[in-house]
Image (spheres, rainbow, N blue to C red):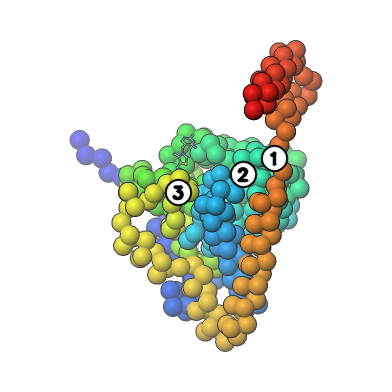
Amino acid sequence: MSITVPAPDPELAAGLDGPLTVLDLDGTRLPSELLDPHLRDIDEHALTNLYVDMVRVRRLDTEAFALTRQGQLVLWPPLLGQEAAQVGPARALGEQDWVFGSYREHGFALLRGADMGEFARIWKAYAHSGWDPREIRMAPSQIIIGAQTLHGVGYAMAAKMDGADEVALTTFGDGATSEGDVNEALVWASTFQAPVVFLCQNNQYAISEPVHVQSGVPLALRPTGFGIPSMRVDGNDVLAMHAAARIAFDRARAGDGPTFIEAVTYRRGPHTTTDDPKRYRDEAEVEAWIAKDPIDRVERALERMGANMEAVRAEAKIRADQLAKEFRAAAEHAVPPVADEIFDNVYAQPTRRLERQRLEHRAFVSSIEGAK
Ligand SMILES: Cc1ncc(C[n+]2csc(CCOP(=O)(O)OP(=O)(O)O)c2C)c(N)n1
Ligand SMILES: [Mg+2]
């Protein structure tokens, strides 16, 4: 028996022949019929802002990595290499929109306005969610792979029922697309035409598992089977990512339902600070992706536009150093939680069983303290 895979519907998927790109590696602009109309307002000033955002995000990442090595944070999942994939879409969000992401979305957290003190508490294991999700309209970091896509779709369905002008952006990794949760989320989003944007940051690995082991087809093809249109985008090109996100948000706001964006990018660092990627991937592969660096590419583009790069770099450095200093101080001064409080937020009304556990826990803590 032979099975023929049907050709992808070009109406449903863009960029399957090669990720959609508008900024070439040398900083020249490549024409894109699909994306260009959504970038008309991006002048030198706007591109500089995106550049500074990416530099700040990278600096936060570098600082957090160092703080983990110094024992100030307990864990950090680095995003080095994925700055454009986050900054482009984050800057396309409306203030009223929501983000439902994983544990690697430091760029989104920063640009949504997460307080650095609250943010640091998460990675010191002092808090499940440092920030107040309602305040910055970003759900707590999700560790259960793909679960946030269901939360995002649920939120978007409710927003539609309420007639609210809100879009949910849910962001996840390549590995997550193999999870049941993500596939269920695609079904619900498609069936209810929910105003949701799926952003898959395909950083080529699910811990040590390369993406080709997970899927024989581009990930952008997967949602098309659910009737959800998708775009495969150069995830190291902040302009392409920004334009694709704008298209997806516009569709959602116009009542045209969900869109899927596959950001083709690369995780240059380890999966987390407890991982050693040298055990499963070749350094030459990393080098090849360094050549596609998302920040260098914008520097070259700005140079071509005639920007005073010395001044731009200096400004970006001042702002990035300021952020790193703020984050370091926050990590160093974070106050650990009182263990007893863990019982306060389980139920609105405490149960007798819970109260008993609280007393047992207190007795346990004083037994250790007494033994000291
Ligand atoms: C449901 C579930 N299964 C397994 C894990 C363990 N786990 C943590 S990260 C990860 C890989 C996820 O890869 P991907 O979706 O590509 O995201 P990335 O870490 O590359 O950003 C796995 C399997 C988990 N956290 N949740
Ligand atoms: Mg991945």
CB at disc 3 and ligand 1 closer than 8 Å: yes
Position of 233 compared to 102: left or right?
A: left
* Mark 1: amino acid: Pro
Tell me which numbered mark, 3 or 1, is placed earlier along the sequence: 3
Q: Height in image: 182 above or below 331?
A: above
Labels in figure, total: 3
Q: Can residue 322 be seen in this view?
A: yes
- Callout in the foreground (3, 1): 1
Secondary element at image label 1: loop
Whole-number angstrom distance, CA of label 2 to CA of label 3 = 18 Å
Numbered circle sitting on residue 124: 2
- Callout in the foreground (2, 3): 2
* Image location of residue 81, percent across then percent down: 48, 61
Tell me what residue is drawn at x 49 percent, y 73 percent. Answer: 296
* Mark 3: amino acid: His
* Image location of residue 257, percent across then percent down: 60, 47
The residue lying toward the viewer, choosing from 12 and 350, is 350
Q: Do the residues labelled 2 and 3 touch (CB within 8 Å)?
A: no
